[in-house]
Image (cartoon, rainbow, N blue to C red):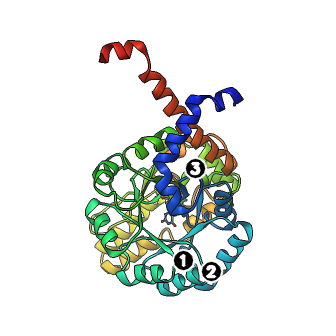
Amino acid sequence: MDAQITTSPARIQARQTLQRLWQPGCDFLGTDVAILGGAMSWVSERHLVSAISNAGGFGVIACGAMTPERLSEEIAATKALTTKPFGVNLITMHPDLDKLVSVCLEHAVGHVVLAGGVPTGATIRQVRDGGARVVGFAPALALGKRLVKMGIEALVIEGSEAGGHIGPVSLTVLAQEILPHLQSVPVFVAGGLARGDAILGYLEQGASGAQLGTLFAASSESIAHERFKKAFVRASARDAVTSVQLDERFPVIPVRGLNNAGSRRFLAHQAETLKKFQNEELTREDAQLEIEHFWAGALRRAVIEGDVEEGSVMAGQSVGLVKAVRPVAEILHDLVEQAVDALVARDTRMAQPSLQGNLG
Ligand SMILES: Cc1cc2nc3c(=O)[nH]c(=O)nc-3n(C[C@H](O)[C@H](O)[C@H](O)COP(=O)(O)O)c2cc1C
């Protein structure tokens, strides 16, 4: 970028404005920019997490189904690659949750993100008493307020545009529901974000920062298979669809990912299972389990083995904005510059004489 443009008074002022807007997020995370790399099972490991933190953002390890020993190894390996702050995302229904929290505390991990359900007060206390900060997810205002009362110190609000397991409400609406009424803790917005100007909009609504997943999954440092990343570059927003439930008696957890042979086969599998249930070849419980087991191991198959046809290619709608595989530092740099551009453009628009005339 032109040095004159970069250092123009308008740009310097815009940078200061952006900094003021997300300073609570930066302070909470201990980072230069208030952008978290959302935890992604199989994807958010030492390389991507350290790359995000080294570039000034906040990387988060996805513990997923890891054992405490595996998690300990991953944290140690991440620490070998960065001295910057990073966090660990734990799924609350993991059978060894207490031990996983202890592992994080033994390694002096600064932030623990509790995902996949409402955490207990005991888990929140365990994290805080151990000296780490605790982050939760708020799918609705009432739950967000309850989590804050329980001791959660920051919240992520994730819209249905996001990749992976999702709630039913878009970020546009969640932000309006939650941001004006929850100002006692930093709130990070997530879902469908791929540009700095969009993030800026939410900062101006009261958010303290943003969490992105899809964009980082397709970064150079992500260990995702080349075919997984290529599928991201090729896809448009409308290819990132939610899993379809065929019969309300057999609930399917909504997951957003790229439409492929696997997702089409999932529909046929549900239909066959339903038939077996109706013919009394399967009990209701066994039929439900058959449906749930369909995707077992499928994310790994796509991310690690590169089977993007049969595997689960979890991706948010922002996948349509992924145009190339790029280094994390470049992605973060562009997000900041786009926010600054938007602030400068707004100031320029507001200073136009015709507009002043109209207002005056
Ligand atoms: C491939 C993939 C895997 C994910 N796995 C997890 C996970 O294991 N735990 C979790 O809390 N969120 C998971 N997410 C959600 C991300 O952390 C993040 O909130 C989301 O990607 C943000 O929306 P975006 O994809 O539109 O940027 C996953 C997302 C993707 C794309």
Mark seen at residue 65: 1
In this view, 72 is above or below 229: below
In this view, 211 is above or below 103: above
First of labels 2, 1 by sequence position? 1
State whether label 3 is within 8 Å of ligand 1: yes
Which residue type does callout 2 highlight? His
Q: CA distance from mark 1 to mark 3?
A: 23 Å
In this view, 195 is above or below 209: above
- How many discs mark residues in the rendered view? 3
Label 2 or label 1, whichever lies nearer to me, is 2
Q: Residue at x 38, y 84 (%)?
A: 122
Give x and y (percent) for residue 150: 33, 75
Q: Residue at x 33, y 80 (%)?
A: 285
Give x and y (percent) for residue 265: 48, 59
Which residue type does callout 1 highlight? Ala
Q: Secondary structure at mark 1?
A: loop
Q: Are marks 1 and 3 in contact (CB under 8 Å)?
A: no
Which residue type does callout 3 highlight? Leu
User: In the picture, which quadrant includes the N terminus?
Assistant: top right
The residue under label 3 is 215
Residue 178 occupies quadrant: bottom left
Q: CA distance from mark 2 to mark 1?
A: 19 Å
First of labels 1, 3 by sequence position? 1
The residue under label 2 is 107
First of labels 2, 3 by sequence position? 2
